[in-house]
Image (spheres, rainbow, N blue to C red):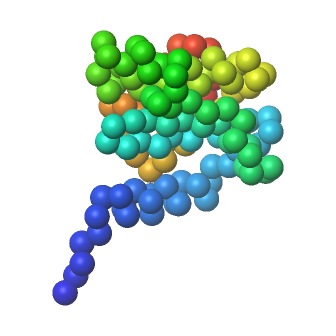
Amino acid sequence: MFKKRDRNEVRVIRHARVRKKISGTPDMPRLSVYRSNKSIYAQIIDDTKRVTLVSASTLDPQIKGQLDDVDKKGAAKLVGKLVAERALNAGIKTVVFDRGGYIYTGRVAELAAGAREAGLNF
């Protein structure tokens, strides 16, 4: 009998396949996205040093108060703007976008749009 893989297992396999090709460098770090049912997380990573340079999520105190008026897509856009603002303050202007194996629609696309609006290039 065949055992059907669950959606997250398929996502992890897809993410591993993409990560073979995408890597963050000091000149162009990687903007990684993780999406849970309630929250969304974004971090900018330098894979050569294996260090997180900047991060933001819906659990951040700066965004927490604004989440009452917006839906999940709006919250993702706020996280994108916050991570881009922090990246620009750290001197990061261009990144490689890593969607984490998720389909580029909905909250993932809104996070990317928010980061682009705030001035991040990818």
**Residue 81 coordinates in the image, percent (x, y):** 53, 18
Q: Is residue 55 left or right of residue 7?
A: right
In the image: residue 97, left or right of residue 91: left
- Which residue is located at x 49 percent, y 37 percent? 41
Q: Is residue 89 left or right of residue 115?
A: right
At horizontal 40% and vertical 14% (from top left) the residue drawn is 66
Q: How many marks?
A: 0
**Above or below 115: residue 21:** below
* Residue at 19% across, 87% down: 1
For the C terminus, the quadrant is top right
Residue 92 visible within the image: yes
- Position of residue 91 relative to residue 22, above or below, is above
72 or 96, nearer to the observer: 72
Residue furthest left as drawn: 1
Residue 105 seen: no
Q: Quadrant of residue 71?
A: top left
Place of residue 45 in the rendered image (x, y in percent of width and height, measured from the top left):
68, 42
Q: Is residue 72 left or right of residue 116?
A: left
Quarter-of-image position of residue 37: top left
- Residue 26, given in percent of the width and then of the height, sits at 80, 39
